[in-house]
Amino acid sequence: MPFKLFEVSKPIPERKEHTYVKHCGDPEDCLPKCNSKTIPGSMTERGCAFAGAKGVITGAIKDVAHIVHSPVGCTAYGYGTKRYPTTTDMPDGSQFPIKDFNIKYIIGTDLQESDVVFGGMKKLRQAILDTNKEFPFVSAIYLYATCTTGLIGDDLDAVAKEMEEELGKPIIAFNAPGFAGPTQSKGHTIGNNVLFSKLVGTTEPPATTPYDINLIGEYNIDGDLWLLKDYFKEIGINVLSTFTGDCCHDEIGWMHRAKLSVVRCQRSSTYIAKMIEDKYGIPYMKTDFFSTKYCAENLKTVARFFGLEDKADELIAKKMAEVGPELEFYRKKLAGKKAFIFSGGPKSYHLSVPLQEELDMDVTGVSSMFEHEDGFEKMKSRLDEGKLVIDDPNALELEELIEDYDIDLIMGGVKEKYFVHKLGIPCLLIHSYENGPYIGFEGFVNLARDMYTAIYNPVWNMLEFEETEEPDVPNVEEEAK
Amino acid sequence: MSMNLIEKDRVATINPLKTCQPLGAMWAVTGISRAVPLVHGSQGCSAFVRYCLSRHFREPSEIAVTSLHEDAAVFGGRKNLVEGIQNVAIRLKPDFIGVITTCSSEIIGDDVIGFIKTAKGELKEKIGEEAVEKIKIIPISTPSFVETHLKGYDNTIKALADYVAEPSQPNEKINIIPGMVNPGDIREIKHMLRLMDIESIVLADISDPFDAPLRPSTTEYKPYYPKGGTTVDEIVDSANSVGTISLTKYAGSGALSLEKKYNVPAELGPIPIGVRNTDQFLRNLKKLTGQDIPDSILDERGLLIDSMADVASRYLFDKTVAIYGDPEITSGIARFVGELGMEPKLVLTGSKSQEFVKDIEKVAKETGAEIDTMIDQDLRSMEVYLKDNPVDLMIGGSDARLMAKENDIPLVRVGYPVYDRVGYHRRPIVGYNGGIQLMDLITNTVLEKYYEPEHWKLQQ
């Protein structure tokens, strides 16, 4: 039986189709049902389309003012929630005046009852003027529709067009109201489409080289991008544009000038890579840079495209010598530990093989709250027989999972972390990381160290009071040898 | 010697100092034992709030959602809510479901009361009448485009008074509506009530649910419910109490409702932050219960006064402070820093409350300070203000951490949200003990910033 119905989900039997148990004899298209609506009344991990558009795609851009056209909630929740740090460096060598501007400010229209009744477009226009006055140095202003503006029918595109003419500055509307689509993934699609159709092909880079790439789907969570950029630089590859970690508005406009698109997060952004290939003939490749092996393989693949394989080999050898011994220590510590990757989207397929092959861990299963069929195919192909692949899991199922599968570590987000702790096992932040970056060689060591410190945290040996004489305390120094 | 109201000079809200009603409702429902907040809206409405509450308390925040999508936007959310209530009732077996509305469900005009009836009817066929009657399913109207999170909290407590409380035999207890304060604050209030030998019903008590022990062998699994919270029976019984004290005058509708419907006398505010506010709280308690104020509490008061005498005039006198956040905490702290000899230079809140203005006027009179006041404002207003009017200290939540750093003004973290430090949800700021804790924090922050460079001043 390839599908599993959790005991706790028996009252909603339709959940059965969403949990697939890998069975090697199954046809390839045997996958969990996905990208469909959440069953109402679930404690789902899913977010909304607005979260997908602003939270994931555009929120990492450093020189843009974001205006959320909403009652105050959506604006407040869009503030400082993502770990997307940015520098002040601009591609033309100039400096943007405020560091981490994208983290520091969020702007909203704070819609009131009267706006809901009479429409909020006037308020939005004024908010754009105010924003331009407060932050005259921004390169562009982005507007976001939300449930409220979607329902009252405010025309964001019209306001954007009108105000763009008035201010002479790009103003772009993202119509991804919260209720659009079953998951935040809908917001990714809309974000990609808008940025492609409005921006790509509209600007020219200050300079080009024969070795230019677009690094797509890399949002610089906890500094991931900066590591990758260093690697590419050392190999001789120039990151012409990133989409959208630590990038600027104009950078997206010249994505059509790259020689190759390298796609990192394959769920949030393969869309734009495809569109660039279709329109401008620029090929793209899907990549994994988590772990040493994937990172080495994929750096080589990208380098080979430019005939720079030797440089890649040099870098890989150097990095492996640096991280090898420490990683070996963690491998011994983590071998056999059971992990469940309870992640948002693609980390579930990026991480399962590295955890299994490079750290000898046992990946009990993976899940995703917003993945589509192609992603689940990959997850399935990267797991062993009998392992779980779950779409849109909910809190109750997570409890059963932990109890039934004797899991040592959950890799999840803030919403799960403290809940999992209450059940007596560690949970590691994998959406936004504990002490990242987690990408690449050094990053994989960081990840391994964080997993090690989570699992071996002395607290897990002290969960219960013991009535009898003092039990043997594990000797950490002995174990470390 | 006066309060100067500074008006907002733009329409755009930049870094809001408030959030929407549903958050306050989810906060309050979490304070009820074996309760599930069920948000009738898009998934973002629960996901964002769960994220924000979890990172503030470092605790689980289990909230269900009816997952409204395009079809609901067109045809209404009836199906989602009816199905959602049933799934929550059957799978999670709660004692209480708070149905919390959002922008979307309010705009599409869903008849939540009617839908709850329908859901109950269908549920009876599935799990039997008795089982359904055991679950309180209460509508909580929280349109996000009206007022702030505090109003959502207020509406929830009012819904408890209106839909759950039932009169029977007098119980000699006092009802406490804590407002949106931390677990440590509620525990401090309960500590004072114990010293006064007063039994209480806290509406609603988040102190254990948002600060729960990690004891796997005693944790109730499948579904996980944290220990504690106010039981439904206690809420029912709140109609029989000798009085209600709402620690917040800005969210006292529940207290007024109990007074009007069941003759339970209400006292609204002040939040017992600082000496005089705590004194007033105790007088209110005495008035409603007839209990004397014991020496043990007066000793605690004496400890606070002693600590203030030791440091206030030496280190804190005339230091200027900017205070921001929810209205009652902000006005409470403004009064307390005045008692400490400091000068509240700027107070601001995202709420549009005339009551707040009156409170600050009172503080201005007491302290003799010139207080610049902003209501219905955002953190950007404070940032711009501070450029021309620097202060010695800022007191408020984490959202102003970057502007504090850039302006080199030390920030004492209080209120909600605090996510860049740990333990602040455990540490009380109310009562005499909370006063000592807060004063120590303020003083040590001042010492570190203003005295460390001349460290010899700290040698005795």
Image: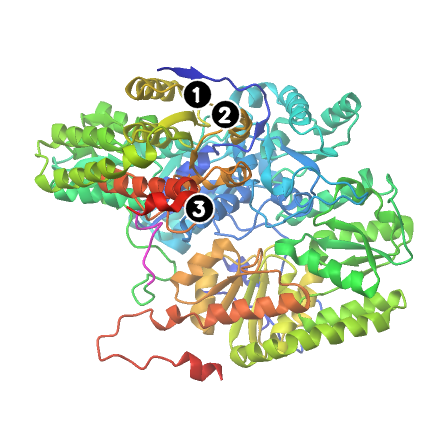
Q: Residues within 10 Å of mark 1 (few under 14, many from 20)?
A: some
Secondary structure of the magenta portion, mostly? loop
Determine whether label 2 and label 3 are within 8 Å by CB.
Answer: no
B106 to the left or right of A254: left
Q: Amino acid at mark 2?
A: Asn
Inspect this view and state whether residue A336 appears.
no
| Residue B53 circle label | 3
Percent across and percent down for residue B207 are 30, 47
Q: Which residues are magenta?
A: B207-214
Q: Amino acid at mark 1?
A: Asp
Q: Earlier in the sequence, mark 1 or mark 2?
A: 1
Residue at mark 1: chain = B
**CA–CA distance between discs 1 and 3?**
31 Å
Observer-side mark, 1 or 2, equals 2
Front-lying residue, B77 or A112: A112
Observer-side mark, 1 or 3, equals 1
Residue at mark 2? B389
Residue at mark 1? B372
